[in-house]
Image (cartoon, rainbow, N blue to C red):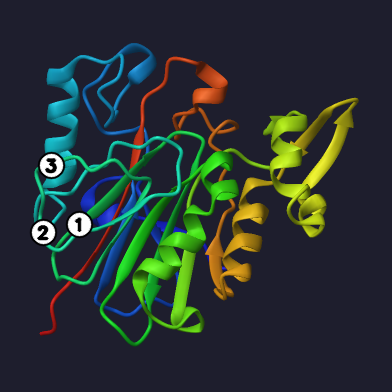
Amino acid sequence: MRGAHDATSTGTDWLVPQWRAPARVRAFVTTRNGGVSRGAYASLNLGYAGDDRAAVDQNRHRVQQHLPAAATWLRQVHGANVVEVGAPNASTPTADAAVTRAPRVPLVVMIADCLPVFLAARSQDVVGVAHAGWRGVAAGVLENTVAAMGCPPHDIVAWIGPGIGPQAFEVGRDVYDAFVQHDAGTANAFAPLREGKWLADLPRLARQRLARAGVHDVEGGTWCTLHDPARFFSYRRDGASGRMGAFIWIEPPQ
């Protein structure tokens, strides 16, 4: 399975997907390193909640230097809404996924333990990114993103970024039932831990939902945010936690 390589050319340890997306698609996921925030938010925190706003502004500015235009940030609510972005947008739509067909229009979702999922069409100029926590995955955010791309699902490739891993994500009956009651086949993504508790494999659940939507070319999903505190923020691990960003856009034809 191919995963990602570090963006060493930018002097960062960001993750750059290795996947079968068209050459003009650009994407990366930041880590927690390379910013100015302090304490629990050290150092490249991109989320305003709990942190010093000036520090977050400076962190976002550092990332912006690697983007072709201003990114469209979302107000994420762990839902399944998808917004289409046609131009760099200073507003903050309420959504947990975005798609674009326009060149040089960066999309972004923020993550700590939830998965970022990139999607790109092989034969059309359209990309998307989804914020895929368990609530969003159960609600259909991945299927909705695939549908919003408006192309045959078999033409889409996907890449799953860092999120809480299958050895760390302890869940209760509510999470188990949210999936298994609607699709008994998802039970293989839950390892019994003790009475009423399971370890959930969120990347596997995401793959299952993508497959159900017709997307089978999926890479990534191998990084655990909780088990790598040197590199990743984790809300489940730390409580007060920063946010990383997953960015994707299309470069214009040469």
Query: Gap between marks 1 and 2, in whole Å?
Result: 7 Å
Q: Work out whether residue 11 or residue 41 is closer to the camera in this orientation and state it.
A: 41
Is residue 67 shown above or below 102?
above
Query: Gap between marks 3 and 2, in whole Å?
Result: 18 Å
Kindly indicate whether the residue at mark 2 contacts the one at mark 1 (C-beta within 8 angstroms).
Answer: yes
Q: Quickly name the residue at label 3.
A: 91
Amino acid type at image mark 2: Pro
Q: Quickly name the residue at label 2.
A: 68
- Taking the spot 45% from the left edge, 77% from the top edge, the residue there is 156
Residue 59 percent location from the top left of the image: 19, 31
Amino acid type at image mark 1: Pro
What is the secondary structure assignment of the residue under circle 3?
A: loop
Would you call the spot at circle 1 few (<14 residues within 10 Å), some (14-19), or many (20 or more)?
A: many
Labelled disc at residue 106 = 1
> Can you tell which quarter of the image residue 110 is in?
top left
Q: Is residue 237 left or right of residue 149?
A: right
Mark closer to the chain start, 1 or 2: 2
Looking at the rendered structure, the number of numbered marks drawn on it comes to 3
Would you call the spot at circle 3 few (<14 residues within 10 Å), some (14-19), or many (20 or more)?
A: few
